[in-house]
Amino acid sequence: MANIQSNKFCTKAIHAGYDSQLHEGALNPPLHLSSTFAFEDIKQGADRFAGNAEGHIYSRISNPTLSILEKRIAALENAEAGLCTASGMAAITSVLLTLLSHGDEVLVDKTLYGCTYAFLNHGLSKFGITVTHVDMTNVDNVAEAISSRTKVIYFETPANPNMRLIDIAEVCHVANQNEIVSVVDNTYSTPVITRPIDLGADVVVHSATKYLGGHGDLIGGLVVASTELIERFRFEGVKDMTGACMSPFTAMLILRGLKTLELRMQRHALNADYIAGWLNKHAFVKKIYYPFDTDNCQFALAKKQMHYGGGMIAFELEGGFQQGLQFMDALQLVQRAVSLGDAESLIQHPASMTHSTYSEEERARHGISNSLIRLSVGLEDKDDIQNDLQYALDTLKNFIAA
C-alpha cells in the first residue's frame, strides 16, 4: 500500500493490498483474465513450483486480482493471510478437508447453516470423520466434549438461522489450550462487527456472497488465517481436493463491495435495530432473536464481541407455521428469497428452505422451530420496511383472533 499507512477500517477496505502506481495508475485493480502465466525461463518456473520464488503459475492456485482481495480481507480481519474460494461452502470444505483425516473428530455447535450441516453430517462421515454436536453457548460443554481425536472446533456466531451467540474468546481459548484448530464462520457479522482473529480464533471463513459482496450478484468465499495455514488450504484444500477457486471477475466485484462495507453494515444494523425493537412490541410476534435486543439473555455477550447488532433478525409469530406462511406471502417490499446481506430486504422460512437438509427431529434438537422466520434487513428506508411488515401482519388479524 504505497504511502498509505492506516489502521482505520474504511481506509483499509479501500486501499489495502493495492498500489495503483504499480499498475500504470489504474485506480481500480486490473482484472486478470488469464488461466495460466508464462515464465521468463525454465529456472523461474521450477523455482515457483518449488516455492522458492514468488509469482503466479495457474489461476486455480493464485491470480493477481485474487491476490489483492486476499491481502485486503486479511487486513480487515487482522490476519496474516487470506484465500479466495468459489463459494462460502468451498471455503468451509477446503478448510475442513485440509485439517481433518480419517479417525479425527470435529466438534461443532448445535446450530449451523443447512449446507454446512449437510456437509458435516452427510459428507465427512463418509470419510471416517466423527462430527460431534455440542451446545457451545456453555464453554464447559466444549471442554468436556474434547477427546484425543478432536482436531477442529467449528462454529458460527451469530448462528444461522436462530441468532445464537458463542463466546469466541472463551471457546477459542479452550481450543488453544488443547492444541485444537478453531474455525469461526463470520459471515453474519463481517469484520466490521466482529474480528474473531483478535479474539483468539485460528481460522475465519466467510460466504462473501453475502455482506462482503453486498449486491446479490456473485457467489464467493474467503478464508483468513496464519500464512502457514493459508498455504495449506491453498495447496491441499483448493488445489488438490476441491478445485474450488474463485474467478477473477468475482474477486473484482468483492473488492468493489468491500469499499462500502462499513457504511452498508452500519445502515443494515441501524435498520435492523429499529425493526427488531418494533417487532418485539408487536402483539402478533411471539419471540424475536436479535443480538442487541436488551431482553436477549445473550445481550451482554453481544455487546462484548460485536460493535453493532448486525442486519439479521429471526422471529416467531403467534399462531405458528401457517400464519408464518400467510405473513410471508403478503409481503410486497420485502422479497421472499434465501441468502442475506443484499441491499434488498430478504425473508425466508428456514425449516422449508435453507435448513431443509435437517430432518424435522434434527431441527427440533438443534433449536430451529418450524415457525421460525429469518429476515435480512436491507438498506431501504426503515419506515418502508416497517410499513410492509405491518401490512403483512395485519392480514393475520382474523386468523390469530380466531
Image (tube, rainbow, N blue to C red):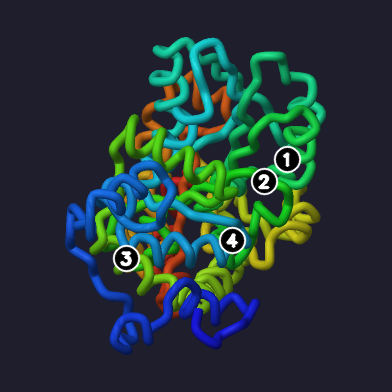
Residue 225 in sight here? yes
Spatial CA span between label 4 and label 2: 11 Å
Q: Are marks 3 and 2 in contact (CB under 8 Å)?
A: no
| Residue 145 rendering spot, x and y as whole percentages | 73, 19
Frontmost of labels 3 and 1 is 3
Amino acid at circle 2 = Ala
Specify few, some or many for label 1: CA neighbours under 10 Å numbering under 14, 14-19, or 20 or more.
many
| Residue 183 rendering spot, x and y as whole percentages | 59, 39
Location of mark 3 (residue): 65
| Residue 362 rendering spot, x and y as whole percentages | 50, 21
Specify few, some or many for label 4: CA neighbours under 10 Å numbering under 14, 14-19, or 20 or more.
many
Q: How many marks?
A: 4
Frontmost of labels 4 and 3 is 3
Spatial CA span between label 3 and label 1: 32 Å
Residue closer to the observer: 98 or 25 = 25
Is residue 357 depicted above or below 29 in this figure? above
Label number found at residue 362:
none
Q: Secondary structure at mark 3?
A: helix
Q: Are marks 2 and 1 in contact (CB under 8 Å)?
A: yes
Q: Are marks 4 and 3 in contact (CB under 8 Å)?
A: no
Amino acid at circle 1 = Cys
Spatial CA span between label 1 and label 4: 16 Å
Amino acid at circle 4 = Glu
Specify few, some or many for label 3: CA neighbours under 10 Å numbering under 14, 14-19, or 20 or more.
many
Q: Is residue 217 left or right of residue 107?
A: left
Q: Is residue 231 left or right of residue 145?
A: left
Q: Are marks 4 and 2 in contact (CB under 8 Å)?
A: no
Spatial CA span between label 3 and label 2: 27 Å
Location of mark 1 (residue): 172
Q: Secondary structure at mark 1?
A: helix
Location of mark 2 (residue): 201
